[in-house]
Image (tube, helix red, strand yellow):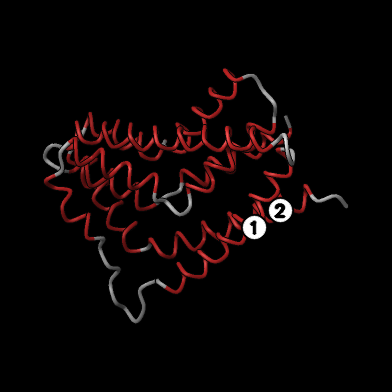
Amino acid sequence: MDALSELLPLTVGMAISPLPIVAIVAIVLAPRGRAAAAVYVATFTAVSFALLLLGAAGASRASSAAGTGKVTLILSALIAIGFAVFAVLSWRSRPRDGHPAKTPAWLAAIDAITPVRALGLGLMMAAANSKNLPLALKGGAIIADAHLSIVLSVILCLGVAIGGSLPLIVPAAVALFRSPAVTRSLQRAKTEMIAYNAQMMTVVFAILAANEAAAVLRHLPL
């Protein structure tokens, strides 16, 4: 059960995703944003849940050969290296010499978003997320490593998926009671996250790399 304590920083790491948050803020500000926001958040959460289940199932199958603990250790080592590389790449991609950050091309089309397009955007943001994909797979492996019942394992996977989606769920809920002040706050948040996305992701990747490296050291037989 001690391994389950690793799920909290992992869930926080999944939650800190500037671009998916920018997307939900832009969606709720769009003319047809309320329906599209619900679809986007539900899709993002469902994909995260599926990836967690996939990680748990894969680790369970591998346990007969190598043990889930060894699978988790290998995943932690690979993720630590990957996140360290992504931290460097994110820092190198930051805007320089006073140039503004480049706005993602998909963001310009969100004003005309529909629920169907929101579904596709949710799939893309969750499945192609270079940070959340390995974290979700590792989260599933950690849950499998605890050797819990199937029902409890599924509940834990769902809890991590919802926790990792909270920064998307909150703006979607706030949009139901949208006021001019809330709209201004959301617009300002979107602008700031676009401007400092590279810097934020550098910090997030660096922290996650350090956390995974610490997990590797804790599990090494010394």
The amino acid type of the residue labelled 1 equals Ala
Q: Which residue is mark 1?
A: 210
Q: Residue 16's x, y, as percent?
A: 46, 48
Furthest residue toward bottom: 97
Q: Are marks 2 and 1 in contact (CB under 8 Å)?
A: yes
For the N terminus, the quadrant is top right
Q: Residue 49's x, y, as percent?
A: 46, 32
Q: Report whether 112 appears left or right of 149.
A: left
Q: Which residue is mark 2?
A: 214
**What residue is drawn where x is 77% and y is 49%?**
218
Furthest residue toward right: 222
Q: Report whether 1 appears left or right of 121.
A: right
Tally of numbered tags: 2
In this orientation, which residue lies closer to the viewer: 200 or 148?
Answer: 148
**What residue is drawn where x is 20% and y is 41%?**
117
As drawn, 18 above or below 175: below
In this orientation, which residue lies closer to the viewer: 188 or 93?
Answer: 93
Label 2, label 1: how many angstroms apart (C-alpha)? 6 Å
As drawn, 34 above or below 193: above
Disc 1 crowd, CA 10 A, few/some/many (<14, 14-19, 20+): some
Q: Residue 50's x, y, as percent?
A: 45, 33
Q: Residue 141's x, y, as percent?
A: 62, 38
The amino acid type of the residue labelled 2 equals Ala
